[in-house]
Image (cartoon, rainbow, N blue to C red):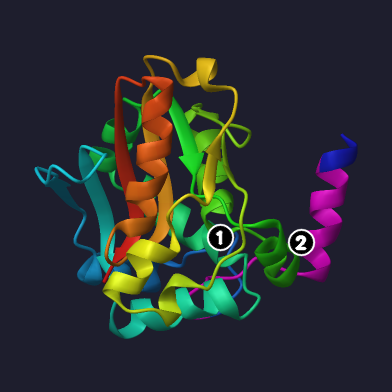
Amino acid sequence: MITKIIHVILDNIFPPVCGICGKIQQQYLCQKCFLKLMALAENKTIDNWETEMHFYQLLYIFKYEGMIRKIMLEYKFHEKPYLYETFVKFILKDQNIVEKLQSYDTIIPVPISKKRMKERGYNQSLLIAKALGKYLHINVETNCLLKTKHVTAQSKLNKEERKQNIQNVYELKNKQILNNRKILLVDDIYTTGNTVNECSKVLKQANPERIDILALTKD
């Protein structure tokens, strides 16, 4: 009851808006902007056959370009965490994607370092993972995969530097929780795949049934 009252008060102070056009919208995505996103959505699944990759499939929703790129940059770097609501609402409107996501046992967000968390105030992948877990009734694990080192942001590096930069920065805890589980690893932007691949490499130590990637965008 108290939580509901708090949400009502917050909605009056900070009314929910469509993340695309900014108009007040209880569902965080108006019909007009939903149609815009529909026209841009790719919703592609790519099987991974590269031996150096440690995950099986990549599912991404948008190409990282144009309007989507602008929105992603605002979400990630310009203190607009509420945009996760817009992305999640859009994803959940596609029944094919929903059915695929419901096949997983566990959702894990790509973690960020404590320093990055302090700087940004939120983990953009965690917000999406938690919302999907809530709506789809899938457990979200945040205490298994941890980022123990703060490194240069991947976006500032070239392909080879990214690969080196991300090595040995993740740690696995409570691995028994993930044994024989179907894991969905959630990230915001898939570029070279080095980040999610390193995370998957660490997660494989827990002997999961499989690891797949859900990325909002693919560069």
Q: Is residue 107 magenta?
A: no
Give the number of callouts: 2
User: Alpha carbon of mark 1 to alpha carbon of mark 2: how far?
Assistant: 21 Å
Q: Is residue 175 above or below residue 56?
A: above
Q: Secondary structure at mark 1?
A: helix
Q: Secondary structure at mark 2?
A: helix
Q: Which residue is mark 1?
A: 124
**In this view of the protein, can residue 93 be seen by the observer?**
no
Quadrant of the rendering where the N terminus is positioned:
top right
Residue 80: quarter of image: bottom right
What's the magenta region? 4-21
Q: Which residue is mark 2?
A: 11
Residue type marked 2:
Asp
Q: Residue extending furthest right?
A: 2
Residue sitting nearer the eye, 87 or 151: 151
Q: Residues within 10 Å of mark 1 (few under 14, many from 20)?
A: many
Residue type marked 1:
Gln
* Mark with earlier residue (1, 2): 2
Q: Residue at x 72, y 71 (%)?
A: 119
Q: Residue at x 38, y 73 (%)?
A: 33
From the viewer's perspective, tell me whether residue 73 is left or right of residue 208. right
Dot label at residue 22: none
From the viewer's perspective, tell me whether residue 11 is left or right of residue 22. right
Q: Residue extending furthest left?
A: 49
